[in-house]
Amino acid sequence: MKLEGYEMDQTLKEKLVKSYDAEAHRRNEDVTPEWKDAERETFLGWMIEEKTSSVLDLGAGPGKDSLFFQENGIHPFAVDISPEMISLCREKEVQAEVLSCDEVNKLGRKFDAVWAMNSLLHIQKKDIETVLREIHDLLNERGLFYLGLYGGDNKEGVWEDDHYEPKRFFSFHSSTAIQQLVATYFTIENVVVLPPHTVGSQLEFQSLILRKKGSIGKNNISGQAK
């Protein structure tokens, strides 16, 4: 994956809105890969065990994951930078609001859990710690946080071969780097690294289940850190 340098934050956001607005209906019609279904099922199991009532779907896209959680008794709130995506969430009768991942502090409420499937991929490295702190602050005590990210290498930039237009900015982290980043605000409950051939990508996929720091939970780290 070839990456170019990134640009100013507001320009980056405006391009992401255009990219995802243009692809919203196609993404709504796409079939979710089995490995993503499995990730969702696993986190649902954690939430049910914890008697979770509410979940923030961060970077919700067309709301497929929110609808899944809603159908399984968890009350979702979906946020996404794309107005077209949020429109599709609302068509599914999911409560939703247009917000970027670095604006969640504007919600003015707390959640039992946060689900972020690939949504933090567009956060610049200089901003990632601030976003993690904001996610920590909007979680209730003992709150769970699912963080899923493509990665493996520490690099960021615009993906030159992206078929979306405008081409999107991505920020990738090694497994070791992302675990070090989250450790300031969260206890790591579970880590799994899925290899590229499993997820159909040039990159591995890092799956982390985290708990708001200061609460007690089991630590279970599997997969190979890079």
Image (tube, helix red, strand yellow):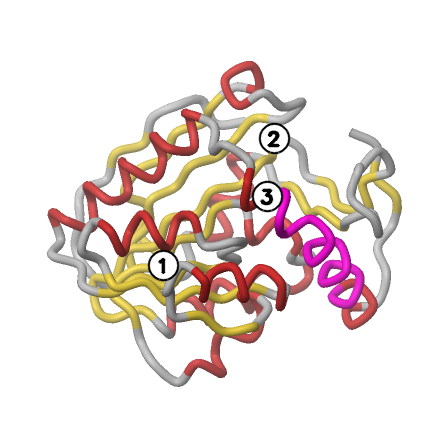
Say above or below: 12 vs 226.
Answer: below
Which element type, helix, strand or loop, lies under badge 1? strand
Give the Cα distance between marks 1 and 2.
23 Å
> Magenta region: which residues?
13-27
Was residue 18 drawn as part of the magenta stretch in this picture?
Answer: yes
Position of 82 with respect to 186 (left or right) is right
Residue drawn at x 67%, y 22% is 202
What amino acid type is highlighted by mark number 3?
A: Arg
- Residue 27: x and y, percent? 59, 43
What amino acid type is highlighted by mark number 1?
A: Val
Give the Cα distance between marks 3 and 1.
21 Å
Q: Which residue is mark 1?
A: 114
Residue drawn at x 32%, y 32% is 221
**Quadrant (top left, top right, bottom left, bottom right) of the N terminus:** top right
Choose mark 1 or mark 2, whichever is in front: 1
Choose mark 2 or mark 3, whichever is in front: 3
Was residue 137 drawn as part of the magenta stretch in this picture?
Answer: no
Q: Residue 152: which numbered mark, if any?
A: 2
Say above or below: 114 vs 203.
Answer: below
Which element type, helix, strand or loop, lies under badge 2? loop
What amino acid type is highlighted by mark number 2?
A: Gly
Question: Magenta stretch mostly in which secondary structure?
Answer: helix
Choose mark 3 or mark 1, whichever is in front: 3
Q: Which residue is mark 3?
A: 27
The residue lying toward the viewer, choosing from 20 and 203, is: 20
Q: Are the residues tagged 2 and 3 within 8 Å (C-beta)?
A: no
